[in-house]
Image (cartoon, rainbow, N blue to C red):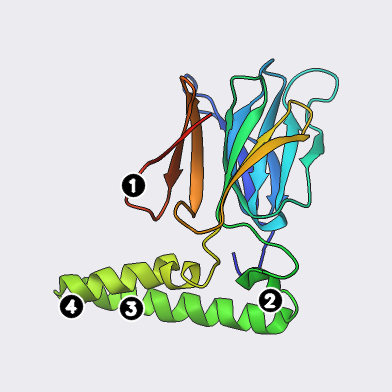
Amino acid sequence: MFENEAGGRVIRYNIHSGETEILAKGLHFPNGVQLSNDGSFLLVCEIMNRRILRLFIKGEKKGKIEIFADALPAEPDNIRKSSGGGYWVGFTSARNSTNPLLPDRLSLYPNLKRFYGRIHTFFCSLLVKLSEIIDNCSFRSVAYKLNRGDYILSMFPRHGIVIEFSENGQILRSFHSPDGRISDLSEVQEHEGYLYLGSFVNRYLGRLRL
């Protein structure tokens, strides 16, 4: 993630035959995937490039990739359909020129970023291995939190953001939590006039009336 390596792929798995097929590769941390309303393409959130890709799986453009939305204000996580025919996307934390995130700052020093990423991986992997040997719940918890990058997330501004996109990739509306009351969003699900907001770190489920 820190080195922004292009090792991500989108793979289709046939549950009947057990066969797999690589639909796209060379992606920078692809995460959220959503089938389009007509089933002709997939929308893929590419976290580290802060954009959403359109991957065609049917029709004349089958196999081609286009940019659905680019230059987003944060890292897009999961993507889900909205009742209006568009799509909801949750973001970890909003960013701007006066409030850059840690990856923005590190991008100015690529060698330092690469060094930091590798040191972090080595050190945290070592702690996890030690935690499997040392029978101590507190030590094990700290090791796994460090390995997961929880302390890095604590350096991010607590500015929650959700964006609704049209079927063509235009931003229709956005909801913000600049005070950080609800942040680190990874999932948005619309249901009966509410948005339900999930997170990979928060111990609660947020709800927003539309």
Can you give x and y, in whole percent of width and height, for residue 48 in the image?
66, 58
Q: Residue at x 52, y 82 (%)?
A: 119
Left-right relation of 80 to 54: left
- In the displayed structure, 66 sits above or below 5; it is above
**Residues under labels 1 and 3: Cα distance?**
28 Å
Residue at which label 1 appears: 204
- Circle 3 packing at 10 Å, graded few (<14), some (14-19), many (20+), is some
In depth, the one of 42 and 70 nearer the eye is: 70
Residue at which label 2 appears: 105
Q: Residue at x 59, y 25 (%)?
A: 82
- In the displayed structure, 144 sits above or below 123; it is above
Q: Which of marks 4 and 1 is in front?
A: 1
- In the displayed structure, 195 sits above or below 197; it is above
**Residues under labels 3 and 2: Cα distance?**
27 Å
Residue at which label 4 appears: 134
Can you give x and y, in whole percent of width and height, for residue 4 in the image?
67, 64
Q: Nearer the viewer, mark 1 or mark 2?
A: 1
Can you give x and y, in whole percent of width and height, for residue 127 in the image?
33, 78
Dot label at residue 158: none
Q: What element carries label 3?
A: helix
Q: Residue at x 71, y 42 (%)?
A: 52
**Residues under labels 3 and 4: Cα distance?**
10 Å
Q: Which of marks 4 and 1 is nearer the N terminus?
A: 4
**Residues under labels 1 and 2: Cα distance?**
30 Å
Q: Earlier in the sequence, mark 3 or mark 4?
A: 3
Q: Which of marks 1 and 3 is in front?
A: 1
In depth, the one of 46 and 8 nearer the eye is: 46
Residue at which label 3 appears: 127
Left-right relation of 105 to 180: right
- Circle 2 packing at 10 Å, graded few (<14), some (14-19), many (20+), is few
Q: In which quarter of the image is the N terminus?
A: bottom right
In depth, the one of 209 and 33 nearer the eye is: 209
